[in-house]
Amino acid sequence: MAENNIGFDKDLLYLYLCGVEQAGQVSHDQQDKLVEHLIAVSASDHSIYRARMRAAYCNNYPFTSLSMYFAGKVQQSLGMTDPARDFPEFLYLSLWWGMTLSGAFLGILCLLIAFWAARGPLVLPLFGAIALAALFYLTVPPPSLSWSLYQVTPTPPAPRVSLHHTFWLGLYAWINPGAAFSPFSVFPRCLCAMIAFAAFALRWSGRGGLAYWTPIVVSFVHQSEAPILLAVMIACDLASRPRELLRPAYMVPILLTVVLTALRERMLSIMGFSLLGIAIALAVPIGLALLVLAVPKLRSAVTSLGLIANRFRTSRFEHLSLPLADTVVILLGWVAVVILCFAVSRIDQVFRVIYLWSELFPRYIGLFQLPVFAGLIYAVWPWVLTKRTTATREALALVSCLMLFLGVAQWKRPWIPTAALVAQAQTFEKKILGQHYAPDGGSFSKTETPWYYLMLRRAYLGGKGLDEYFAKG
C-alpha cells in the first residue's frame, strides 16, 4: 500500500513540511509567504483559500509529520543519504520510510491490541471485519467522493447532487471508502480508522474506560478525527449504558480529550466560522438548560420527556449485545450526518461545501467501517451457529486462508525498484527547478506540488525558493 500511495505529491510534501516546522528547523513564514505570493500574482480565490487553510492547520498531524522528519535525521546520522549530495533521494526515502514505518508500527499495534482484548465470540467478527474490508479495498473500485456535495454545472453532463444520490454514494463507500479514507491506506486519517477499530474492540471486551483514552491518541495523529470518535463513543454509551459515563474511568479521559480538542482544534475558525457564531451556538443550549432549571413547569416537562426517552432507549437498546447496539448507533449517526451535510451544503458557501461537508460523511464512514463490519458479523453469527455448530472453526480457517492469499498476492506482485523511484524523484527536481509559476497549471496536484517541494528544499539547502518560482520567467 505504501508503494502505491507514497510519492511526491502536494499532500505528502505538505505533511513533511509541517514536520520540519514542528521540529523547529524552519519557521512557518514560508507558508505565510506563499499566500502573499499567490495574492500578488492574482491567483484564483480557490488557490489562495487552500494555501491559507493548509498554513493554518499545520499542527494537525504531528505523528506522521514528525515521523518523516526524524526518518530523515536517522538516515543522515547513519550516512545513508545526504540532502546536500542528493536532495531528491534524501527527501523521497525520508518521506517513504517515515510514513511506512510509523504507519506499520501504529497499525500493527492497533491489531495486536484488538486481538489481545478479544475473547471467545469476538475473535471471529474482528478477524472477519479485517478480511472483508481488505478484500473489498483490493477488489471493489472505489467511489468518487471528492467534492461529492458540490454541484458542478451544467447538469448534465455533471450528475445532479441529491439526497438520494448521496445516500447511495455513502452505502457504496461503506464497502470501499477509497484510498483517502480506508484503514488500509497510508494517510493520517487512515491510521485513525485503525485506532477506532482497537477502541471498539476494547469496549466490547469490557474495557470501556481504557477505550476512552484512544481519542487522545487520535488527536496527535489527525486532530479533527478525535472529536468525531469521542462523540460517537459517548453516543453509543448513552444509548446502551448511560450510567457508565458517570464513572471516573470514563469521565477523566473524556474531559481530557475535550480540553485537548479545545486547545488544538482550529477547523471551525479555518473554515471561516466566526467566534461570535460559535459562542452563540454554545450559549444557546447552556441558556436553555439554565432556563429549564429555573422554571419548575419546564423542569417537570423535560423530566417527563426524559423518562419517555429512557423507556424508549431501554426497550430498543438494553436487550441488544454491546457490539450490535454500537453498530446500530453508528449507522443511525451516519444517516444523521448525511442528512446534515446535504442540507447545509445547499445553503453554505462553496469552499465549506468542498472541504467540510463533502468530507465529513466519507470521513465518518472510513473511521467506523471496521467496527460496523465486526458488529454486523457478531449479530448474525449466533444464527449461523444454530445451523452449523462447527461454523466458527470453519470460518476462522476460511478467513485465515483468505488473508494469507491477499497478503501473498500483494507481496508477490511486481515491485518498483527503489533506484527507479529515486531516479523519478531526481527527474522531478530538475523539472521543478526549471519552472516558474503559471496560473494555468491544471490540477491542484500539478500546481501545488512544486510549492511544497521548493519550501522543503529551501529548508534543507537554502537557494531557490518561492521568490524565484513566482518571479516572471
Image (tube, rainbow, N blue to C red):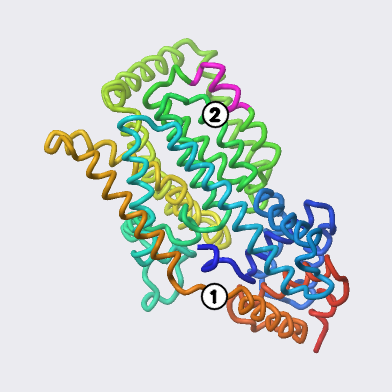
Q: Is residue 401 found inside the magenta-colored segment of the image? A: no
The magenta segment: 245-255
Question: Mark 2 highlights which residue?
Answer: 285
Q: Position of residue 115 (x, y in %)?
A: 43, 37
Question: Mark 1 highlights which residue?
Answer: 416
Rendered image quadrant of residue 473? bottom right
Tell me which label, 2 or 1, sits earlier in the chain.
2
Q: Nearer the viewer, residue 402 or 78?
A: 78
Q: What residue lies at 41% left-to-right and 28% top-to-bottom?
A: 205
Q: Nearer the viewer, residue 389 or 434?
A: 389
Q: What residue lies at 78% left-to-right and 63% top-to-bottom?
A: 31
Q: Residues within 10 Å of mark 2 (few under 14, many from 20)?
A: few
* Amino acid tagged 2: Pro
Q: Position of residue 331 (x, y in %)?
A: 35, 42
| Secondary structure that dominates the magenta span | helix
Q: Is residue 290 left or right of residue 382?
A: right
Q: Residue furthest right?
A: 463
Q: Are marks 2 and 1 in contact (CB under 8 Å)?
A: no
Q: Position of residue 24 (x, y in %)?
A: 84, 53
Q: Nearer the viewer, residue 270 or 256?
A: 256
